[in-house]
Amino acid sequence: MKYFAILIFFFLSLSATAQVQSVELVASGLTCSMCSKAIFKSLSQLDFVADVKVDIEKSSYILTFKSPEQVKIEQIREAVYDAGFAIETMQMTANFPKRKAIDEEVVVLSGYQFKWKLSNVKDIAQPQKVTIVNKEILPTAGFYYLKF
Amino acid sequence: MRRIKKVAFYILLLCTSLFQFKDIKAQELFVNAEPASIMPARSIMIKQSYATMTGKENDNNFKTQLEFSLSKNWMTHLGTNYKSWEWYTQYRFYSKDAVYEHLRMALFFRAIYAASNAIHTNSILLEGQESVLHSGLIITQLKHKWASSLTIGALVKQDALAANGQAGFQYSFSNGLLLYPKKYTSYGQTNVNFYIELIGQTLFSDKAHYLDVAPAIQFIFNSQSKVNISYQLPLINESNRLTTHTAALSWDCLFFNALPKHKKKS
């Protein structure tokens, strides 16, 4: 029974590796702390967000999640736009299922299908920080594209 | 004409001198004008203001306002000074954001209903003394250390003596900057902002016009509540309006995510 539990835990941890650990975004269109707080409040009320760390000066927000499989990129985007602002950059820190990143190859993370947008093959660190390159963080042909 | 040139010179001098400051940040939470930006979606603001106006006559204005942001692009206000009612609505139709900057445009419509109507002056009074319709365009630009907003609108007042009512233009040009803190570290820091706003009106009928300047200081507490102190005085006054100088004190508080979210059908 004990070994069975260890085995289950091992498989669970394997499946949990291909997931987004945190999202870091830089919002655009603001300079005031009241505007920054509006984004902070909007992100904090997302039900899958555990914590939001903010750097008001840089307009950057680091989001961690209650359970990584429930990360909703559309809702993060909408929260910032609802506060009245836009997203300049969105980066994710994730554990990837593979060690090599190849251009146009599909990667499944937290239930999303991502594609690499790279000029050459790159080694992936664990965890690896990547940037979503899609304009305005809107998927193109159903995919979010990632670069290093 | 000489007076206008003189005013233009002082405005230019002020603008260029403000640009000399380093590390200043722009602020667009104007005291006497609305920026083209909309309050955060689903937020509510409560605003209380007191103004004392002097000139040929003296008057007081005690105003309560409730502001609702129905979506990220649309907000509406309801206000009363206990002698009149005001409804205001604003729709943002253009927004271009970049880091520390944006350009936004919005359309607005305002209706003021006053119980006792028409004080027969050749200006249109917007503080609830008479019934007025007011509509126009707001353009706001925020660029690092500079926030400027231009509002241009058409006005028409209900006046029993003027058969077709009296109509004119109302315009304002607002600028703001952050005085304190130099660097943001938390939402609890009290912010101090300085604004300089120009407010003008021209009536079509008898060419009456005025141009006021309104410097204002603003304190923001907990990134949520504001206290504004402003003083409006005329630069040019070619009208027979009853009051010319306004000292105002106002307080407001913003409640984030106060309205329920409309769930989309999936």
Image (cartoon, coloured by chain):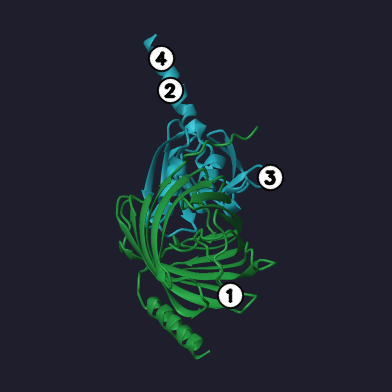
What residue lies at 46% left-to-right and 58% top-to-bottom?
A30
Q: Amino acid at mark 2?
A: Phe
Chain at tag 4: A
Q: Which residue is mark 4?
A: A5
Distance (Cα) linking label 3 and label 1: 53 Å
Q: For the residue marked with disc 3, what is the amino acid? A: Ala
Could you say whether the residue bearing mark 1 is in a helix, strand or loop?
Answer: strand
- How many other residues sit within 10 Å of disc 4, few (<14), some (14-19) or many (≥20)? few
- Location of residue B20 in the rendering, given as x and y in whole percent from the top left corner: 37, 78
In-front residue for pair B13/A148:
B13
Q: Nearer the viewer, residue A12 or A100?
A: A12
- Give the Cα separation between the discs numbered 2 and 3: 35 Å
Query: Which residue is denoted by mark 3 in the rendering?
Result: A141
Local crowd at mark 1 within 10 Å, few (<14), some, or many (≥20)? many
Inter-mark Cα distance, 1 to 4: 81 Å
10 Å crowding of disc 2: few (<14), some (14-19), many (20+): few
Q: Please report, as a chain letter, where disc 3 is located.
A: A
Q: Amino acid at mark 1?
A: Thr
Chain A visual colour: cyan
The residues tagged by marks 2 and 1 sit, at their Cα atoms, a distance apart of: 77 Å
Find disc 1 in the rendering and name its residue.
B202
Specify the subunit that label 1 lies on: B
| Label ID, residue A10 | 2
Would residue B22 appear left or right of A136 to someone viewing this image? left
